[in-house]
Image: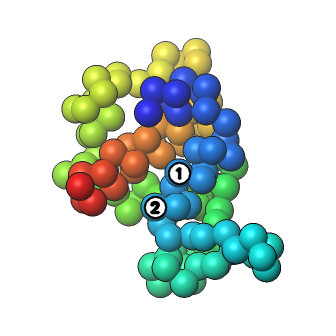
Amino acid sequence: MWDILEGRLPDAAVNQLVWERLGYRYDADRQTWDSQQVSPAWRERFPTPPDFIEQRPAIVHLTRSIPPEHKQLLKEELGFTGYAVAALTPARTRRATIVNWLLSYRRQHP
């Protein structure tokens, strides 16, 4: 999780972590994405896996999918207090959201 927050994990790998948990599967034989395991709410809006680091609508949807009781997991589980204002960028903010979502997912799917 810290590798995501600190930017050590490439964007593609970060996205892949979320995609797998949402149910997106890549069919190498057909060289296409299969979204049959993706919930209808996600599949309708994002038929192919979105880039959560680059696409604002995707990260907004991800943020809204975090249950209210899990909104503070970054702080509660990791002791993460946020980024310094000088270091704050949209990509870092989105990475923090992704980590919070992954922590929430873990809580919901032990």
Residue kind at label 2, given as amino acid type: Arg
> How far across and how far down the image is residue 5, in percent?
50, 29
Q: Residue furthest front?
A: 29
Q: CA distance from mark 2 to mark 1?
A: 7 Å
Q: How many marks?
A: 2
| 35 vs 3: above or below | below
| 7 vs 44: above or below | above
Residue at position x 30%, y 27% from top? 78
Query: Quadrant where the C terminus lies?
Result: bottom left
Residue at position x 29%, y 46% from top? 71
Image quadrant assignment for residue 7 = top right
Q: From the viewer's perspective, is 103 left or right of 9?
A: left
Is the Cβ of the residue at disc 2 closer than 8 Å to that at disc 1?
A: yes
What residue does disc 2 label?
21
| 36 vs 55: above or below | below
* Residue 13, visible in the rendered structure: yes
What residue does disc 1 label?
17
Between 27 and 14, the one lying in front of the other is: 27
SS class, disc 1: helix
> How far across and how far down the image is residue 87, in percent?
58, 18
Residue at position x 25%, y 32% from top? 77
Residue at position x 54%, y 24% from top? 6
Q: Which mark is residue 45?
A: none
Image quadrant assignment for residue 35 = bottom right
SS class, disc 2: helix
Q: Residues within 10 Å of mark 1 (few under 14, many from 20)?
A: few
Residue kind at label 1, given as amino acid type: Leu
Between 17 and 79, the one lying in front of the other is: 17
